[in-house]
Every structure is written in structure tokens, then in C-alpha cells.
Amino acid sequence: MIEVDTTGFTGLKVISPKIYKDPRGYFFESYNQETFNKKEIMQNFVQDNQSFSQKNTLRGLHFQTGNHAQCKLIRVLDGAILDVVVDLRKDEPTFTKHYAIKLTSDNYKQLLVPKGFAHGFLVLSDTALISYKCDSYYAPTHEVGLHFSDPDLQIDWGIPQENAILSEKDKKNLSLKEILNNESYISHRS
């Protein structure tokens, strides 16, 4: 059993599983394709990824282009993150807008991110273990990065920009203007 909440962005959903707790601990189904299909979530996930990061690590904002675009189902196994997505679907009213949510191992929430979004997260706890499913395989030649601190995005990450721990690759991510000037980076309805 799951509860699905909408976000104001087409296809972007917050999923809360039913948690069964007793004196021993808890149990829940983190993913059940039949249950998701009943809620009209029809992705066929083909790859699971896991990352471990320390506090203030900021990963993203990443996306893949064209036929390699990915839908992701993100959850936190241990710790807490601020999960942020930016809508790069030109035909949507939320085009270039962002959505942020705190995902933790204590709130059990998952974020379903449709194709056409850039995705990133900031680690809020001392460390965080994140797991996410993808409906398309990783294709490094189709990966693009959107810079987390682009002023046109107006994302409040909750920490000073200089405190963010970034990979060398993410330090070189593109601005929103650079992304918008390349049609192959923008998602269109088929």
C-alpha cells in the first residue's frame, strides 16, 4: 500500500509507503510494481543506484538527454537530504521551475522524478545513504549537468554556496541559459 501525493508538476510525485511498526522495528515495501501500476505509475525500472555521501555534499543537478532520459525513484536509506529537481520540459507550465523536498530515512518518503527533469541533492545529516531506481541505463555521453547555484534557478539550498562539497565535474556544470540555448538538452512532448 502506498499514498501518492501530487506536487503541481506533471508526473512528479511524492510516494509514502505504509509502514508496519511493532516492538521489533518496522517493515515496508519500498517498491512493488503491481502496487505502483495500480496508482498509474507505470515505469519499468532497469537499474538501481546507491550513493553514500558526507554532510554538505551536493550532487547535481544531473539529467540525461534524448532517448537516454531517465525517470528516477529516489529514497534515503539512512540520513537526510534536500532533494531538488528542475523541470526542463518545454511544453509544461512549470518549465525551468524547481521543486524541493526533504527526504529522510525517518519519513520514508520517495520522490518519483519523470523524464525531463534535472535532479540533485544536498546531504543534510552527517552522512546519507541514497538509493534510486532508473528506467533507462546510465549513458555518460548523454549526461548533462545544470549548475546548482545558477541565480536564474533561485534554489535555496539552505547553506552558503561555498560550503557545498562538489565533484570537479559538478563545478563545471552549465548555466540554465547555456542549457536553454541547446535544443537537444530540452525535453519536448513526443
Image: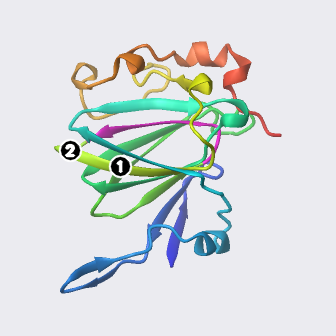
Q: How is the image coloured?
A: rainbow
Q: Quadrant of residue 94?
A: top right
In this view, 12 is above or below 137: below
Secondary structure under the numbered disc 1 in the rendered image: strand
Q: Nearer the viewer, residue 152 or 1?
A: 1
Instruction: Identify the residue at image location x=60%, y=52%.
Output: 46
In this view, 188 is above or below 141: below
Q: Amino acid at mark 1?
A: Ile
In this view, 176 is above or below 139: above
Classify residue 106 as left or right of residue 71. left
Mark 1, residues whose alpha carbon is within 10 Å: few (<14), some, or many (≥20)? many
In this view, 169 is above or below 128: above
Residue on which disc 1 sits: 130
* Magenta stretch: helix, strand or loop mostly: strand
The stretch of residues the image draws in magenta is: 114-123
Classify residue 183 as left or right of residue 85. right
- Position of the C terminus by quadrant: top right
Residue 14: x %, y % from top left:
49, 59
Q: Are marks 2 and 1 in contact (CB under 8 Å)?
A: no
Instruction: Identify the residue at image location x=40%, y=61%.
Output: 109
Mark 2 vs mark 1, CA separation in Å: 10 Å
Residue at the right extreme, as displayed: 190
Q: Amino acid at mark 2?
A: Thr
Residue 147: x %, y % from top left:
45, 21
Residue on which disc 2 sits: 127
